[in-house]
Image (cartoon, rainbow, N blue to C red):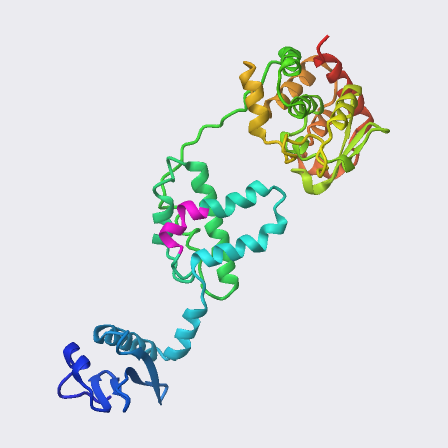
Amino acid sequence: MRQPKKRLTARGVTTINEPGKYHDGNGLILKVDPSGAKRWIQRVTVEGRRREFGLGSAELVTLAEAREITLDNRRIAHSGLDPLEEKKKRQSVPTFAEAARAVHELHLPTWRNPKHAAQFISSLETYAFPRIGETPVGDVSTADVLAVLQPIWVTKAETARRVRQRIGRIMKWAIAQGWRQDNPADAISQVLPKQVTKAVNRKALPYAEVSDCISAIRASGAWTATKLAIEFTILTALRSGEVRGAVWQEIDLESATWTLPANRMKMTREHRVPLAPRCCDILVEAKNIRLPHTDLVFPSMTGKQLSDATMLKLVRDLGFEVDIHGFRTSFRTWVQEQTEVAREVAEAALAHKLENKVEAAYARSDFFDRRRTLMEAWADYVIPR
């Protein structure tokens, strides 16, 4: 490698105008064209072959920057790699933010809940992007992930766990693309402090008070669909989201059956709901206020899906400190204390998946007829006299 007796200076780079090549050392050359344009080139030997790379215009790349690039290229060449190919690889690797959006787009069709899909990207935008969003996904380190999670690991434990899980998913995608070999989200388990979280039970009413709650809801001046949706949720003992997303195609009033497709159920399998007579009356009332341009059974006043917050606000404003999901607890406690119904029938009514794998393997029935009897008894118990 030719080493000049006198290296270039920053001032010299700006004053040299004579066309030619001016060597700085380590293969770095300032080339001045007859037009007066100046550009950096570098000569490097890669596996016995001399290669020449362009490093950019001298007007845009300073002498110090050119020297730094030159040393990096020499280190790459010394390891037996081609600096030009390595540069192309680096340029093709997306940033963490770009990779996150690609993974989000890839999984978007698989999320049943639009809220979860939105939370995936929004949580990363809030906590990860400010720190590592512009970092190439192949360069994200364990220290980077730690810097994202540490400020929220204890104070926002659940959020931090989800952010870590989402970062890990993006890293796995990057590994599959050949952009990295490891998952830094997995490497911090022993570094982060232990999270202390308390289980928070959903607030539930004693089952003997559910009837009073329904009476108060009916007497309120709230939007009719909101009132009907809450009562329907109580009587069917299903989750708020399953009721709020109900569409008329799922309802068969003639057979008093509501059939939810697998993609709307937490357990990802079709679920039939036997409808008590009062449930059918609710559906008839809902039809009378049916809004155009929506198939939702219980739409908001704007025709969009009701929110869980809207339902909760009504119940809380009426003086009942209860969560909408808590009505499922009221139902389950009533079944345990006031009936002789078998556990598996009650669990099927709640659309729970059997935890015991052996038991689940042999459970072929959905106990539909027995559940119809149970749900009619529940409705008879809670409907205001």
**Residue 77 coordinates in the image, percent (x, y):** 34, 80
Q: In which quarter of the image is the C terminus?
A: top right
Q: Magenta residues, as a range? A: 124-133
Residue at figure coordinates x 42%, y 70% from the top left: 91
The residue closer to the viewer here, 370 or 309, is 309
**Residue 117 coordinates in the image, percent (x, y):** 56, 45
Res 244 → quadrant: top right
**Left or right: 12, with 201 as reference point:** left
Residue 130 on the magenta span: yes
**Residue 112 coordinates in the image, percent (x, y):** 63, 43
Residue 90 on the magenta span: no
For the view shown, which residue lies furthest in the top direction? 385
Residue at figure coordinates x 54%, y 13% from the top left: 319
- Looking at the rendered structure, the number of numbered marks drawn on it comes to 0
Q: Quadrant of the N terminus?
A: bottom left
Asked whether the viewer can see residue 323, the reply is: no
Asked whether the viewer can see residue 205, the reply is: yes
Position above or below: 193 against 367:
below
**Residue 359 coordinates in the image, percent (x, y):** 71, 35
**Left or right: 106, with 4 as reference point:** right
For the view shown, which residue lies furthest in the left direction? 6
The residue closer to the viewer here, 345 or 95, is 95
Position above or below: 340 against 100:
above
**Left or right: 330, with 156 as reference point:** right
Res 260 → quadrant: top right
Position above or below: 285 against 20:
above
